[in-house]
Every structure is written in structure tokens, then in C-alpha cells.
Image: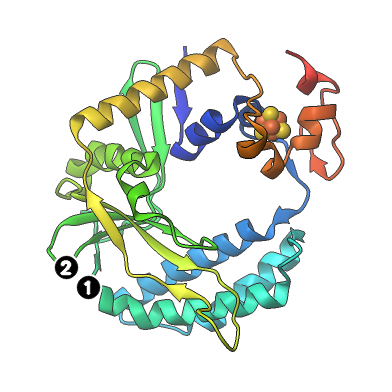
């Protein structure tokens, strides 16, 4: 039997709602138009990563101009769906400001990108780790760097609307998964073990004459996870892998005040088999209503 392959985001989606995982990650049902937040985050990730590579090579470029180009290309290549408070122009202004501020602030953060044995930076490097006979963990840590004290640090790059609660870092599954992946590949990559797990946030507030506006926050990180915390996380992943094998995909609508359904891209399909606005690769009418 082939081992299950789980990414940290896939596992989080399964935990949030197994039915959503089935529809989106197994059946690959997706909105015809990409949510603006996803498109925006993808473009900003690309700009930051390419800018860091250029900075390391002594060839920095204008990141705001690159954001403009890539944001236009993303909007032309695929339909983008905006929320009531968003527009291509407001997000474009926010992205330009964040890209320019990132380039101004990054050198002051005292972080140096880590290089593998071949001298390549570990930026969005796809890694896999077999963590048992029936489970492979897969993931792409955004940035692996040395912090100002010379410790290896993995940074997850986020573009949220508001900064995360720093307490979340101590529990974040995604960072635990990155530690598992980097530990599994440390020797092959020629790196020490990762000591710090953290977050680099580019807060996508609107550009306004008053108020805070877009903000590039200094990285924050915590110590690596204990063996017990890693064991607990892997046990959870094995539990999810077992559920996937058994075909267990119940709906998990939770309570009215904390339901994931309001933000669910496949809500209509889940509730009523309604495929309007969705791309359904292998349409099986009624299948989503089964169980
Ligand atoms: S609508 Fe709710 S129950 Fe259905 S897949 Fe989405 S999150 Fe799950």
C-alpha cells in the first residue's frame, strides 16, 4: 500500500473539515476565480523570494516594480475574486508598499539565508520525510536563515490582514512540520539542526493618508519543538492518514459561532451539490451529498 502524503496545510484542512479536504484536496474542486487574498499572497511571496536571491547575489532590483508586473500578470492569467472591501487598485498599492518596505527593512533584521551543500539558498525548497511505513510528510519551508546569534531558523512568510498572536508560534503545527522536514534533511543539506521556528509577517493593511497602513514586521521566533511535541504531532498525522485510508470524510460544520462553512469555497457543493462558480474535474453529481 502506498503511504499517505500529508502536507502541514493539508492536515490542517482535514482537521478543520474532513469533507472540505475531500472536495478540495482529493477531488480537486476549486473556485473558477481565485480569491484575491491567495493571488496577492502568491505574488508577494514570489517578489520577496526573488528579491532576497538578488540581494544575496549583489543584484538587488526594484521590488515594487516587480510586484506591479507580477500582480498584473496574475490578474490577466486567471480570474481574481475580490471581497467587498478589496479592489485590484487598493491591493496593488498595498503590495507595492509592502514590497518596497520589505527591501528597506530586510538588511536590518540581521538574517542571512542558509545555503545547502551546493551553495543554493533554502527558499521554498520542497522537502519530504518518511515518518513511518504509511506516512510521508511533504512541505516547502518559505525561508531558512541564520538568525543574528548564528542559529538556524525557519521563517514562515505570511501576508495577513492583522498580525498573528505571538503565543500561536509555540503551538503552530506548520512550524512543527518544518522542523521535522529540516531535521530529516539536515545532513544531506549540510546544515545544523534547526533551532528556531518563526514568522515573518507582511501585514496587508490599506494604504491611507492616516493610520498604520501596510507593515513589514520584524521576524519573531521560538525555540525548536521538544521531542514530545514532535511525537504528538506525528501521532496526529498518523491518525489523519488512517482516516484517509478508511475514506472517512465527515462534514464538520461545528457551532454557529465558529463554523468554517462561511469561509468555505465549496460550501454550495457540499450543501446542495451546486457547482456554480466551481471547477469540478470529475463531476459526480450527488457524490458530495453522500454519507
Ligand atoms: S461547507 Fe462546511 S461542512 Fe461543508 S465542506 Fe465546507 S466547511 Fe465542511
In three-dimensional space, the C-alpha distance between marks 1 and 2, rounded to whole angstroms, equals 5 Å
Q: If the image is split into quadrants, where does the C terminus sit?
A: top right
Residue at x-position 33% and y-position 26%: 234
The percent position of residue 205, horizontal first and vertical second, equals 56, 72
Q: Between residues 135 and 109, which one lies in front from this camera angle?
A: 109
The percent position of residue 105, horizontal first and vertical second, equals 35, 79
The percent position of residue 148, horizontal first and vertical second, equals 16, 68
Task: Give the mark count.
Answer: 2
- Nearest to N terminus: mark 1 or mark 2: 1
Q: Is residue 272 in view?
A: yes
Left or right: residue 219 compared with residue 275: left
In this rendering, is residue 3 above or below 86?
A: above
- Residue 110, labelled with which disc? 1
- Residue 148, labelled with which disc? 2
Residue at x-position 86% and y-position 33%: 274
Residue at x-position 35% and y-position 15%: 133
The percent position of residue 31, horizontal first and vertical second, equals 75, 46
The picture quadrant where one finds residue 210 is bottom right
Binning the other alpha carbons within 10 Å of mark 1 as few (below 14), some (14 to 19) or many (20 upward) gives: some
Left or right: residue 185 compared with residue 270: left
Q: Between residues 19 and 255, which one lies in front from this camera angle?
A: 255
Work out which residue is located at the far bottom of the displayed protein and give it. 209
In this rendering, is residue 168 above or below 97?
A: above
Left or right: residue 110 compared with residue 124: left
| Label pair 1/2, CB-CB below 8 angstroms | yes
- Residue 191, labelled with which disc? none
Residue at x-position 27% and y-position 31%: 230
In this rendering, is residue 181 above or below 196?
A: above
Q: How is the image coloured?
A: rainbow
Q: Is residue 127 in view?
A: no
Binning the other alpha carbons within 10 Å of mark 2 as few (below 14), some (14 to 19) or many (20 upward) gives: few
Amino acid at each position: 500500500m502506498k503511504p499517505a502524503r500529508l502536507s502541514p496545510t493539508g492536515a490542517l484542512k482535514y482537521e478543520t473539515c474532513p469533507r472540505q479536504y475531500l472536495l478540495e484536496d482529493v477531488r480537486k474542486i476549486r473556485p473558477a476565480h481565485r480569491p484575491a487574498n491567495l493571488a496577492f499572497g502568491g505574488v508577494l511571496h514570489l517578489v520577496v523570494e526573488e528579491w532576497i536571491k538578488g540581494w544575496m547575489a549583489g543584484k538587488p532590483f526594484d521590488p515594487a516594480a516587480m510586484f506591479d508586473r507580477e500582480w498584473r500578470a496574475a490578474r490577466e492569467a486567471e480570474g481574481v475574486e475580490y471581497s467587498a472591501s478589496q479592489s485590484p487598485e487598493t491591493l496593488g498599492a498595498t503590495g507595492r508598499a509592502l514590497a518596497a518596505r520589505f527591501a528597506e527593512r530586510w538588511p536590518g533584521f540581521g538574517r542571512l539565508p542558509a545555503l545547502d551543500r551546493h551553495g543554493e539558498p533554502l527558499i521554498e525548497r520542497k522537502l519530504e520525510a518518511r515518518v513511518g511505513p504509511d506516512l510521508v510528510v511533504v512541505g516547502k519551508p518559505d525561508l531558512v536563515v541564520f538568525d543574528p546569534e548564528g542559529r538556524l531558523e525557519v521563517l514562515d512568510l505570511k501576508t495577513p490582514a492583522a498580525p498573528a498572536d505571538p503565543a500561536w508560534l509555540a503551538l503552530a503545527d506548520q512550524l512543527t512540520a518544518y522542523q521535522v522536514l529540516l531535521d530529516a534533511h539536515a545532513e544531506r543539506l549540510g546544515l545544523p539542526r534547526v533551532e528556531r521556528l518563526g514568522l515573518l509577517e507582511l501585514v496587508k493593511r490599506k494604504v491611507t493618508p492616516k493610520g498604520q497602513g501596510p507593515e513589514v514586521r520584524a521576524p519573531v521566533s521560538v525555540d525548536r519543538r521538544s521531542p514530545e511535541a514532535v511525537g504528538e504531532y506525528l501521532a496526529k498525522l498518523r491518525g489523519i492518514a488512517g482516516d484517509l485510508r478508511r475514506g472517512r470524510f465527515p462534514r464538520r460544520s461545528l457551532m454557529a459561532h465558529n463554523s468554517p462553512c462561511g469561509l468555505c469555497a465549496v460550501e454550495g457543493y457540499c450543501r446542495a451539490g451546486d457547482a456554480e462558480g466551481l471547477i469540478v474535474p470529475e463531476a459526480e453529481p450527488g457524490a458530495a451529498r453522500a454519507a
